[in-house]
Image (cartoon, rainbow, N blue to C red):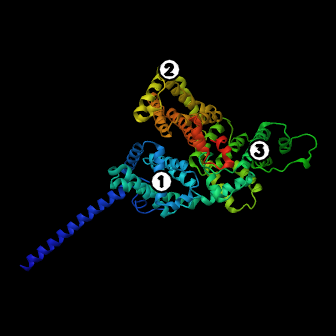
Amino acid sequence: SSAHEDVLEESDVADFEGEMEIDAEAEAVDDFDAKGNTGAKEKYNAFEVNEEEFTELHLGDGAQVVQSTWQHFLRSSGSREAVGEAIYATLFDSAPSLQSLFKTPRAVMAMRFMNGLDQMVLALHDPLALKTVVETFGFQHLDIEVTSPRVATFRDAIVDLLQLEVGDLLTPFAKDAWQTFMNYVGGAYIYVRIKFAERLKCIAASWSQANGKVVEGDDEDAEAGDETPGSGAADEGMEQAAEANALDVARKNKSNKSKSWFGGGGSSKGGASANGAAGGKKDFKNVAVPKSFTDMFVFNAAVMGFGSRAWMQVILDALDAVVTHVSITTRLQEECDVISLRLAKLNTSIALHEFKTVMLASLRSLVKGWEPLHEVSWSWLWDNVERMLKRNMGKPAKQQAALGAFLSSLDESQLMTFRREVYSRFFALAPGSQDYFKQSTTRLHFIADKVVSMSMDMYREPKRMVEDISALGLRHVGYGIPISLFGPFVTCCVQVVRSLTDDDAVEESFRWSVSLVSRILTRVIVEGSTVVMKAINNNSSKELRKAVGYAPRGKRALWMLNVQV
């Protein structure tokens, strides 16, 4: 009897332990559904801000849930401006102390919140693209003290706003995904700020000194980094406008001088003395010591025996844009892509390390107090630029040949197929785009033909095309075309080309070119979509007075006249 009782007791214990194991498994599943299924379980979650590392975020099904709730929020709000105002009001009502961190006018800052969130949400399905976008925004927040408590405040404000606007659509799973997403973004901002801020500030300060620019205080730099007139930027004032004009004159003189320095064979005094080929006596008393980076660079290039390297002039022309926008990853990639296209037209051997040698020598001569940090920072910058350039080295010529042969082989019926299919697929993929394409069929076919010709012209004449695309982008500001439509349009164009050919080289050539065109257009539209430009495009004096009213009295002329893209 006692043995039987012992057996029963052991059986009961086994059953109890089995039930405990089942309950533990159920809790683990629930925990996975609540946390692990929305992202990297060990790295990112809905409760903590991870500022120790910055990797890709894999939200899984949570990405689609976040995007669907966001799109519902946009539709229910009526306009993008209303969404921006709602985010702005919710954020600063919940934490008024944060308002001191943003010096930009409310109307401008609200749209920045809206556009920034929209861009990141749209990239959620692609972890690598999301990481790039978040890193870009992280660079733009280098001078703002982002902390974990502030991230939590922003996260809770956004989630509360969504709860109010979308109601039951924000399920516990969706809320968890949104919190994980916002924690990821905030932690990335902190990580980037800590890891790269010192190098970027060193580069910016030394570049300003090398070019004779006045280095403003930290507060001025925070606003001048990524803002344009009319979007709330605290521009340096009328004095710097005059300085900019002087720099433009200097650039014109530099371009004439550079023709003789870099293999131009000119007869200017600078070129003759530097190459040591001028006849007669040289008056060294009248030789001016180079004081700008450009002049010092061409001088050192000639002294080091690189005076015949015409390709150096191509990089030198774009170096200011590269250094100025080094904290904007997408812009840096765009500049490097254009440089690679221009270098491909020279048909000469290129040794990029030679440019680094001349660049560092010139900077050492112009920057006072050159330290190891300067050496490390500038070497880091150039190494990144060099890798980006080498990635495309030799490809443009092959891509141009492949794309040119394909386009020349198309007959009229195939071109007509391209025209029709592009819009058929585009309107199916983005139904809202039909509200912006109300022109005649002839006009729509013209746009499709223009896409084809621009994809080829980007290889043939990259410098001219950048100027033409910039002008086209400013016109699109007036059209009011959402930048979110460019991605689907490019996708449809590539899909139609893929249906017309089996050659992977042709597809890749077309995709790369039309993608670059799209990126330039998108950037120009974003940078040109200032409150002033919108008022001008709407031909509204009332809106213009309201937009300019945000500007300090002494800077209103700059806000209206200085449009930089």
Q: Distance between the residues labelled 2 and 3?
A: 52 Å
Q: Residue furthest left?
A: 1
353 or 69, which is in the foreground?
69
Residue shown at the point (53%, 35%) measured from the top left: 514
Q: Which amino acid does label 3 sit on?
A: Ala
Spot the residue most to the right. 281
Image quarter for residue 517?
top right
Label 3 and label 1: CA atoms lie apart by 43 Å
Q: Where is residue 15 in the image (x, y as percent from the top left)?
A: 17, 68
Left or right position of 390 against 73: right
List the residue tagged with mark 1: 89
Q: Which mark is residue 246?
A: 3
Q: In which quarter of the image is residue 335?
A: top right
Q: Nearer the viewer, residue 410 or 323?
A: 323
Task: Check the picture and name the quadrant holding the N terminus.
Answer: bottom left
Foreground mark, 1 or 2, reads 1
Question: Is residue 192 among the parts visible in the rendering?
Answer: no
The residue identified by callout 2 is 411
- Image quarter where the C terminus lies is top right
